[in-house]
């Protein structure tokens, strides 16, 4: 669908001996027509149409080649297919998509972290309670039941909370980073 994709690494400032880590770059994609940006199965107008998975995957792959901010997304089209009104609609739709997904992943990360810390705190409280009950030396049925629940339950919640906090939340970090990059990116259409 996308015949050629290329990344242009163009620093905004002249290169110095030591490159600054916040240099901006441009990403360029060659398209045959505007439909390359959108899903083939969605027949709605460009203003509400779904963005193509192929297009997003290609932009993500190119953006992952650099850890720097992407200054501009250059979309090259044959001059005969270009239309300024359509380009304004497509640009608005792409920015809307990037903002919506960035918000979604940021909110999901916030909710997941809150849940993970809750697991750790509740699990820690259960472990401290189990220790207090055990050191009190009570041997009735009720305290035995509480110990049976609090000791493994506390360990489980602490470890699950820590695992999610450290490892699982990192799986979605590239998605959040990508959309955070893209909401700040200028989108331009150019002639092939």
Image: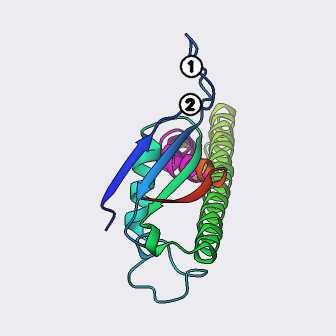
Q: For the residues labelled 1 and 2, say whether their Cβ atoms are less than 8 Å apart.
A: yes
Where residue 128 appears, as percent x and y from the top left, is 67, 36
Percent coordinates x, y for residue 71 in the rendering: 61, 43
Main SS category, magenta section: helix
- Which mark, residue 15? 1
Residue at 64%, 71% (x, y): give it: 88
Left or right for 78, reference 11: left
Q: Quadrant location of the C terminus? A: bottom left
Query: Left or right: 80 with respect to 100?
Result: left
Which portion, as a residue range, is magenta?
152-179
3D distance between C-alphas at marks 1 and 2: 7 Å
Residue at the image position 61 percent from the left and 67 percent from the top: 91
Crowding at mark 2 (Cα within 10 Å: few <14, some 14-19, many 20+): some
Q: Taking 7 as reference, is 45 above or below it? A: below
Residue at the front extreme, as displayed: 80
Helix or strand or loop: what does disc 2 sit on?
loop
- Whole-percent x and y of residue 183? 65, 54
Disc count in the image?
2
Question: Horizontal and vertical percent for residue 181?
Answer: 60, 47
Horizontal side, residue 68 vs residue 62: left or right? right
Figure check: 98 above or below 146? below
The residue at 53%/46% (across/down) is 173
Q: Residues within 10 Å of mark 1 (few under 14, many from 20)?
A: few
Q: Can you tell which quarter of the image residue 20 is in?
A: top right
**Image color mode:** rainbow
Q: Can residue 89 be seen? A: yes
Q: Nearer the viewer, residue 153 or 138?
A: 153
For the N terminus, the image quarter is bottom left
Give the residue pinned by disc 2.
11
Left/right placement of residue 73 relative to residue 22 reads left
């Amino acid at each position: 669908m996308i015949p050629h994709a290329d990344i242009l690494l163009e620093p905004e400032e002249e290169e110095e001996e030591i490159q600054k880590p916040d240099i901006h770059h441009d990403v360029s994609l060659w398209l045959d027509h505007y439909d390359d940006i959108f899903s083939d199965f969605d027949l709605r107008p460009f203003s509400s149409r779904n963005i193509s998975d192929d297009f997003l995957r290609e932009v993500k792959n190119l953006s992952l080649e650099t850890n720097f901010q992407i200054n501009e997304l250059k979309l090259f089209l044959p001059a005969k297919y270009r239309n300024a009104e359509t380009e304004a609609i497509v640009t608005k739709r792409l920015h809307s998509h990037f903002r919506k997904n960035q918000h979604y992943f940021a909110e999901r990360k916030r909710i997941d972290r809150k849940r993970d810390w809750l697991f750790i705190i509740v699990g820690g409280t259960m472990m401290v309670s189990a220790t207090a009950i055990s050191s009190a030396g009570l041997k009735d049925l009720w305290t035995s039941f509480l110990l049976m629940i609090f000791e493994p339950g506390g360990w489980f919640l602490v470890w699950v909370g820590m695992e999610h906090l450290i490892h699982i939340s990192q799986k979605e970090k590239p998605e959040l980073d990508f959309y955070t990059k893209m909401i700040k990116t200028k989108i331009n259409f150019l002639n092939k």
